[in-house]
Amino acid sequence: MIKRISSGGEFEAKVGYSRAVVAGNWIHVAGTVGQGDGVVAQCQSALSIIEKALTEAGAGFSDVVRVTYMLPDRAEFEPCWPMLAKTFGANPPAATMIECGLIDPKYRIEIEVTAFLPE
């Protein structure tokens, strides 16, 4: 069974994707950018959007097994570390950070997660 979750984000309809897709016990949350001034505010906003998608899928951050962080400037990643450590707490996922261009230069971070729900 496949369930598609939309957050109503502007790019979902423009590009043609879902915020998250639940396939069996796997939850795949699309790369998510946030709003705000600066990388820390955008990181917090993106995490909030991701949390809503995970909740709708029946999961939480403790169920995340993989996270990918994408930033146009890797030097901006370190200020996000305390927030990320707090978010994942005692359940840190496997993680990758990629320095790359994002869909719009105003975005400073994009976050993608994969979660697993045990039966």
Image (cartoon, rainbow, N blue to C red):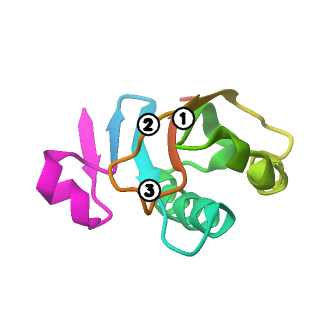
Whether residue 89 appears in magenta in the rendering, the answer is no
Q: Nearer the viewer, residue 86 or 70?
A: 70
Q: Is residue 61 above or below residue 47?
A: above
Q: Which residues are magenta?
A: 1-19
Q: Amino acid at mark 1?
A: Ala
Q: Is residue 3 magenta?
A: yes
Identify which amino acid the numbered label 2 is placed on: Ile
Judged from the image, the secondary structure of the residue bearing numbered disc 3 is helix
Q: Regarding mark 2 in the picture, which secondary structure is present there?
A: strand
Given contact means CB atoms under 8 Å apart, are the residues at marks 1 and 2 in contact?
yes
Q: CA distance from mark 3 to mark 2?
A: 9 Å
Foreground: 52 or 42? 42
User: Relative to the observer, which residue lies in front, 111 or 71?
Assistant: 71
Earlier-in-chain disc, 1 versus 2:
2
Q: Which residue is mark 1?
A: 115
What's the distance in space between the residues labelled 1 and 2, CA to CA? Answer: 5 Å
Image quarter (top left, top right, bottom left or bottom right) of the N terminus: top left
**Residue holding disc 2:** 27
> How many C-alpha atoms fall within 10 Å of the one at disc 3: few (<14), some, or many (≥20)?
many
Q: Inspect the image, locate mark 3, and give the three-letter code of the amino acid beneath it.
A: Ala
Q: Quadrant of residue 45?
A: bottom right
Residue lying at 28% horizontally and 58% vertically, measured from the top left: 6
Name the residue at 78% across, 57% down. 83
Q: Are marks 3 and 1 in contact (CB under 8 Å)?
A: no
Image coords of residue 38 (percent x, y): 62, 67
The residue where tag 3 is placed is 53
Q: Is residue 6 above or below residue 74?
A: below
Left or right of 81 on screen, residue 42 = left
Q: Are marks 3 and 2 in contact (CB under 8 Å)?
A: yes
